[in-house]
Image: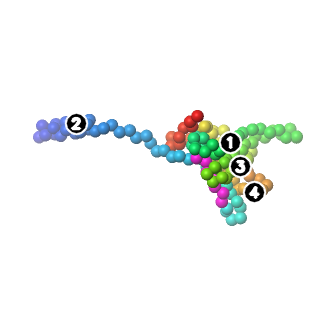
Amino acid sequence: MRTRFTFIVAMAAVVLLAMPARSYAGAKQSAPVTVIPYTIGSTPWVTVYGSLADTRNSADNTSYITCSIGAYSYADGTVLPSANCQAYDAVHNLSAYCYTTNPVMIQTIQSITGDSYVNFYYASSSTTSTCTGMSVTKSSMYSPKTP
């Protein structure tokens, strides 16, 4: 009985050693910039999402996602930090822009790196485009930026 068990274990080891080695690279997702206009009730909204690296790596040379942070001084001496994000989706020929002075959103924008996935949205009107939501994701699923 013991010899049979030893034989089975030995055969299992031979089978395992004979199997080709496999490599699994993990989940991948391409996420170039996408601008989506929509309406809730009578209010027009815009959502933008995409990976900075996948947008940079896209085949077209016009798509982009840009977020900037600055501080502005007013006549009364007040200095306020502000930020904005803008994007152009060449596939749908749509652009987007929103602005914020919200400290939490500014912190979120500060966390963006060259390989981040960015999502922002806002109610779009002729008078203002204040950012309503902002998120930044860093994930191994998204491609790294290439030169």
The secondary structure type at the circle numbered 3 is strand
Distance between mark 4 and mark 2 Cα atoms: 69 Å
First in sequence, mark 4 or 3: give its number. Answer: 3
Mark earlier in primary sequence (1, 3) = 1
Left or right relative to 82: residue 8: left
Q: Mark 1 or mark 4: which comes first in sequence?
A: 1
Mark 4 crowdedness (10 Å alpha carbons): few <14, some 14-19, many ≥20: few
Seen as rendered, the residue at the extreme front is 60
Name the amino acid, label 2.
Val
Residue drawn at x 43%, y 40% is 25
Alpha carbons under labels 4 and 3: distance apart: 11 Å
Q: Which residue is mark 2?
A: 14
Which residue matches tag 3? 97
Which segment did they paint magenta?
32-38
Q: Which residue is pictured at 71% across the width and 64% down the height?
A: 42
Residue 117 visible in the shown view = no
Place of residue 87 in the rendered image (x, y in percent of width and height, measured from the top left): 67, 47
Residue identified by numbered label 4: 125
The residue that disc 1 covers is 67
| CA distance separating discs 1 and 4 | 20 Å
Q: Secondary structure at mark 1?
A: strand
Q: Residue at x 61, y 51 (%)?
A: 91
* Whether residue 48 is situated above or below residue 4 in the rendered picture: below
Name the N-terminal-most of marks 4 and 2.
2
Quadrant of the snapshot with the N terminus: top left
